[in-house]
């Protein structure tokens, strides 16, 4: 595989991540240059002059030479400013990978599918994960086999695309090949045993076995240029278990590691000319993912255990089912020389939870050991149009305008009663009127036993909440001279649940020479609070310093939240970027700085205890130890630099491509917005521990070095990724620092083309079996995950050996 960053003369950071297995670099790049690029509605822009900062990643070519089978993990090890970590013991997040761009929240990056807004996941990150209190889109609902390329716009784009685009935009472009069949079969397994990892043990010497099969069929439809492209993919992945060495210390979790999963996908991309100047298109997507993850261990004497049922304690199992559906349709036509695109984009996402190997301790020996815990669902429907036209003004003026109407619905699905209820000694549901003498106690210590299914209590409410918004925008680009262009965009949006917002963007590019150019932009942005952030509610149990506590996450519109937390409002941002590009035949370089100021970011607050004077009485009456809330809690300022260097040349009998790409990202919390009724409680509202997790959403630096050498039918690829150090704070207080040292992972692969229709790649991810720094404090349960390290940097699965067979006919 060859990775090449080709300079794009963009406004902020910009590059083209391009990979291939053949020597036709020029023709391949020219083909990519002819497509429209995210961030510009000017169809005549090419990747060498588009006024937006973006990476274009040829997914098919990159995936063929790596061991990555999911979009998030592929981008994690390809794009320096993109970060996504596998989770463990994080409830629904064990089934998804929260992702961030430039260290901002998972919900501050907008996901598009072929240029149309893609629906978010219904999951809101709550416990044990980065981006707590944030929703976000799940890119892993889109199979790699269906993707032609991914465009990563790393610049504020709310003025162009609307809410969620504070950090940038990721546009997934589907395959549009109109002939032939392409497929691949992948098999990988984790081989974790090696010198230097003696403090990590597993159930087996080999685990995490992964099988992935995908097939993609392209076919012509009619004789006027119509096509259909269809993908099916199946993934089966076994779990990994990474525990502490029992000879030195043990963590409170016996089963810590990646979840087991089975994924099934179908995606289609259809275009059909109906007449001259009129084209119909349709994109269909369906994915089903079933995961099996372990929650925290319950010991034999735990308040949540009944020894008669589990004499040795137990490890609850969370079975998560995710059903995701996409159906986009549209018409493209001309009206008075305007190119018009009229479309409807529909998407839905549904999570349901089945908790096994568990118990409701307040039911005693009569308790079931499996519960339907309910779930949540989100529906989104967007109808809109876009029109664009070229005018002969100076060196060229492109004007685009459009409008969108979006409907959103969030649903909470109630679980069975025993999954969430607390029962008294007579088997009746405990209410505020139940006397303490009837509460079920642990005879070993006198503590009140918690209700609900252990590991993940079910949802006790059910409701559907909806809203709609209207947007109108204009997007212009003017080439003042052949060297200098400017772009101005503006967007108005109105939400029926919180009001209106107006945002703008100005960008410019000036080419001093054909090889050297400057680009810069300034824009305002916004993100509307999600329906989940406004209405989500859950009561759950959590371990803090090895102690089980019951926590109420109160909805923003609940009576409990109204006592202390104002109604949620939109986040706002100010973005700026400036940089230079240099491009010659063999060498390219881009250096870009950026500045992002975000006001009123929505996150989860800390946990308020029963002795709080504002809400303590309510917590005691409802048998709740702590409460937390969604709040516009803080303002942040992020400064950073992207540097991308690439060199390609013939070396000996083959061709060498070397790419060095790095990101420096520094975020600081500039203000904590403590509500009036919580003044003096800043350390609880947003504790030092919560601040550390926000600031550690991405390593401060991340550097990718990729070397590819190709001789005829043989190619070799080596990739080194350095993740910077990370500092977190455990449950032990502000001085309970947890340090994760800088780590370097090494991926290597070798490929051979048996024929133009068949090639084989073998290799290893994380060849030297690197793990995050082992946390000895895990013996006290102080890590967020409860394991021997947290989900930081490269993850915790260790080394994987893999083979991938690609074929086509």
Image (cartoon, rainbow, N blue to C red):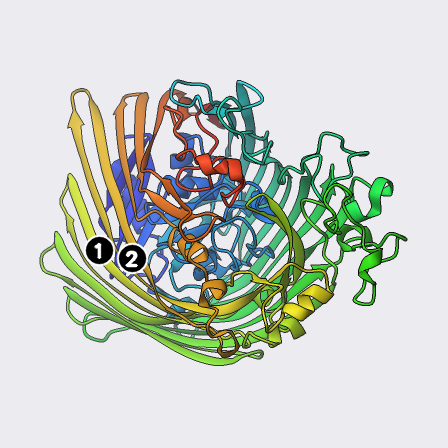
Closer to us: 537 or 235? 537
Is residue 179 visible in the rendered structure shown here?
Answer: no
Q: Is residue 646 left or right of residue 776?
A: left
Is residue 736 found left or right of 438 in the rendered image?
left
Q: Is residue 179 above or below residue 592?
A: above
Instruction: Judge depth for marks 2 and 1 and give the one in front.
Output: 1
Whole-Å distance between the Cαs marked 2 and 1? 9 Å
- Where disc 2 sits, the SS reads loop
Q: Which mark is residue 325?
A: none
Looking at this rendering, what residue extends furthest in the right direction?
426
Residue 412 is left or right of residue 571, and the answer is right
Image spot of residue 426 (x, y percent) = 90, 53
Return the x and y of residue 272 as percentages of the image width and height.
54, 54
- The residue wearing badge 2 is 53
| Residue located farthest toward the left when viewing the structure as drawn | 513
Circles 2, 1 touching at the beta carbon (< 8 Å): yes
Query: Quadrant location of residue 115?
Result: bottom left
- Which secondary structure lies at badge 1? strand
Badge 1 is on which residue? 592
């Amino acid at each position: 595989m060859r990775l090449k960053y080709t300079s794009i003369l963009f406004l902020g950071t910009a590059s083209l991540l391009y990979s291939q297995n053949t020597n036709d670099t020029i023709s391949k790049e020219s083909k990519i240059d002819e497509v429209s690029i995210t961030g510009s509605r000017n169809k005549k822009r090419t990747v060498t002059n588009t006024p937006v900062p973006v990476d274009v990643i040829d997914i098919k070519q990159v995936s063929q030479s790596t061991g990555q089978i999911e979009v998030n993990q592929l981008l994690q090890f390809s794009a320096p400013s993109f970060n996504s970590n596998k989770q463990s013991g994080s409830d629904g997040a064990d089934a998804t990978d929260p992702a961030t761009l430039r260290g901002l929240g998972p919900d501050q990056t907008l996901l598009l599918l072929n240029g149309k807004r893609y629906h978010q996941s219904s999951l809101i990150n709550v416990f044990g994960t980065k981006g707590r209190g944030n929703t976000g889109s799940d890119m892993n609902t889109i199979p790699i086999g269906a993707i032609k390329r991914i465009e990563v716009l790393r610049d504020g784009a709310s003025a162009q695309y609307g809410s969620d685009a504070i950090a940038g935009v990721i546009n997934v472009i589907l395959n549009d090949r109109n002939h032939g069949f392409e497929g691949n079969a992948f098999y990988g397994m984790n081989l974790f045993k090696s010198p230097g990892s003696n403090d990590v043990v597993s159930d087996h010497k080999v685990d995490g076995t992964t099988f992935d099969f995908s097939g993609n069929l392209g076919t012509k439809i009619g004789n006027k240029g119509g096509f259909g492209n269809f993908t099916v993919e199946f993934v089966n992945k076994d779990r990994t278990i990474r525990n502490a060495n029992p000879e030195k210390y043990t963590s409170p979790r016996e089963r810590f590691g990646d979840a087991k999963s089975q994924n099934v996908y179908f995606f289609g991309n259809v275009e059909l000319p109906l007449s001259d100047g009129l084209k119909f298109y349709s994109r269909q997507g369906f994915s089903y993912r079933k995961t099996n993850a372990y929650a925290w261990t319950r010991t034999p004497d735990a308040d949540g255990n009944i020894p008669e049922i589990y004499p040795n304690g137990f490890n609850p199992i969370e079975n998560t089912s995710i059903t995701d559906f996409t159906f986009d349709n549209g018409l493209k036509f001309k009206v008075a020389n305007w190119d018009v695109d009229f479309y409807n984009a529909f998407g839905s996402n549904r999570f349901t939870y089945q908790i096994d190997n568990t118990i409701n301790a307040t039911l005693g020996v009569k308790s079931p050991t499996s519960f339907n815990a309910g779930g949540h669902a989100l529906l989104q429907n967007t109808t809109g149009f876009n029109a664009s036209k070229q005018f002969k003004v100076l060196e060229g003026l492109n004007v685009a305008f459009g409008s969108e109407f979006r409907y959103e619905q969030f649903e909470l699905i109630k679980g069975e009663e025993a999954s969430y209820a607390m029962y008294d000694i007579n088997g009746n549901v405990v209410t505020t009127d139940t006397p303490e003498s009837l509460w079920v106690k642990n005879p070993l210590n006198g503590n009140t036993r918690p209700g609900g299914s252990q590991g993940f209590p079910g949802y006790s409410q059910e409701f559907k909440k909806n809203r709609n918004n209207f947007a109108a925008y204009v997007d212009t680009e003017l080439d003042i001279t052949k060297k200098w262009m400017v772009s101005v965009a503006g967007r108005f949006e109105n939400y029926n649940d919180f009001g209106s917002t107006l945002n703008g963007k100005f960008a410019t590019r000036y080419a001093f020479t054909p090889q050297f150019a400057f680009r810069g932009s300034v824009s305002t942005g916004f993100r509307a609070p999600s329906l989940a952030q406004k209405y989500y509610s859950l009561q759950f149990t959590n371990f803090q310093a090895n102690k089980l506590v019951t926590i109420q996450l109160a909805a923003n519109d609940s009576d409990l939240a109204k006592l202390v937390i104002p109604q949620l409002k939109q986040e706002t941002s100010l973005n700026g970027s400036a940089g230079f590009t240099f491009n010659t035949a063999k060498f390219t370089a881009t250096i870009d700085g950026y500045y992002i100021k975000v006001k009123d970011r929505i996150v989860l607050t800390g946990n308020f205890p029963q002795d709080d004077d504002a809400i303590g009485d309510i917590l005691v009456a409802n048998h709740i130890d702590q409460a937390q809330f969604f709040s516009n809690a803080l303002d942040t300022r992020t400064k950073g630099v992207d540097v991308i260097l690439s060199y390609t040349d013939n070396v000996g009998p083959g061709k060498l491509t070397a790419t060095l790409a790095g990101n420096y990202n520094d975020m600081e919390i500039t203000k904590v917005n403590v509500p009036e009724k919580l003044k003096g409680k800043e350390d609880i509202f947003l504790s030092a521990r919560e601040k550390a997790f926000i600031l550690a959403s991405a390593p401060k630096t991340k550097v990718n070095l990729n070397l590819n050498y190709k001789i005829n039918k043989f190619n070799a690829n080596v990739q080194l990724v350095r993740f910077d150090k990370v500092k977190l704070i455990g449950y032990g207080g502000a001085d309970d620092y947890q340090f994760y040292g800088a780590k370097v992972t090494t991926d290597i692969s070798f490929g051979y083309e048996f024929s133009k229709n068949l090639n084989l790649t073998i290799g290893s991810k994380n060849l030297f079996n690197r793990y995050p720094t082992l946390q000895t404090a895990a013996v006290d349960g102080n890590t967020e995950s409860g394991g021997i390290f947290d989900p930081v940097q490269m993850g915790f699965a260790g080394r994987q050996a893999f083979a991938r067979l690609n074929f086509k006919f």
